[in-house]
Amino acid sequence: LSSFGKMVQASFVSLSSEVIAGSYLWSNILHSVSFVEISIILIILLGIVVSRKDKFTKLCTIWTVAGFVLFVIVQWSAHESPLFSILFSWALIPLFVRGVSFLLNKLWLSERYVYPILAIVLFVINLLTLIDISLFFGTLN
């Protein structure tokens, strides 16, 4: 279950990593659950519920459930699940956006301001991880 959550989180924001025995690896793929992944999953579930009649939402939901089955039930490549986020992000991101849009409408917040702030936060987090990886491999020395 944690592996699926990490795959979902990796579709949006980089995972925590560490250097282990000279290798740059994700930390706690199978042994921890983060607030970020739980939040993203809840928003995705909200997006599924509020737009459940839309055909594209149904397709995205089927693809997401397929990922859940692969990683949770079949336990397929559990340690490498974040690598597969690229295969599922096309379905997860629209569901997330539908959930966020619903929340913003209920809270009377403007998408015009919230989405750029969200994009900047995600960009900065991912950029810092890229810099960290680059420093590990010595390309920014």
Image (cartoon, rainbow, N blue to C red):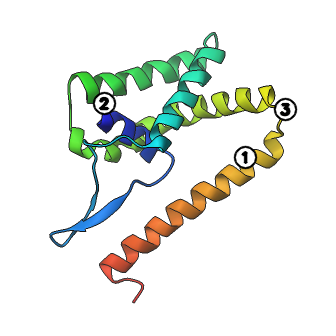
Dot 1 falls on a residue whose secondary structure is helix
- Which residue is at a point 28% across and 46% down the rendered structure image? 29
* Rendered location of residue 126, percent (x, y): 51, 61
Answer left or right for 107 relative to 119: right
| SS category of the residue bearing label 2 | loop
Instruction: Choose the circle earlier in sequence order: 3 or 1.
Output: 3
Quarter holding the C terminus is: bottom left
Disc with the residue nearer the chain's start (2 vs 3): 2
Q: Position of residue 84 (x, y in %)?
A: 34, 42
| Residue at image coords 76%, 33% | 104
Q: Pointer 1: what residue?
A: 115
At label 2, the amino acid type is Leu
Nearer to me, 137 or 5: 5
- The residue carrying pointer 3 sits among few (fewer than 14), some (14 to 19) or many (20 or more) residues within 10 Å by Cα, namely few
Q: Which amino acid does label 3 sit on?
A: Trp
Q: Tag 3's secondary structure?
A: loop
Q: CA gap, disc 1 to disc 2?
A: 29 Å
What is the x, y in percent for residue 101? 72, 31
For disc 3, the marked residue is: 108
Amino acid type indicated by mark 1: Tyr
Counting from the top left corner in percent of width and height, residue 123 is at 59, 60
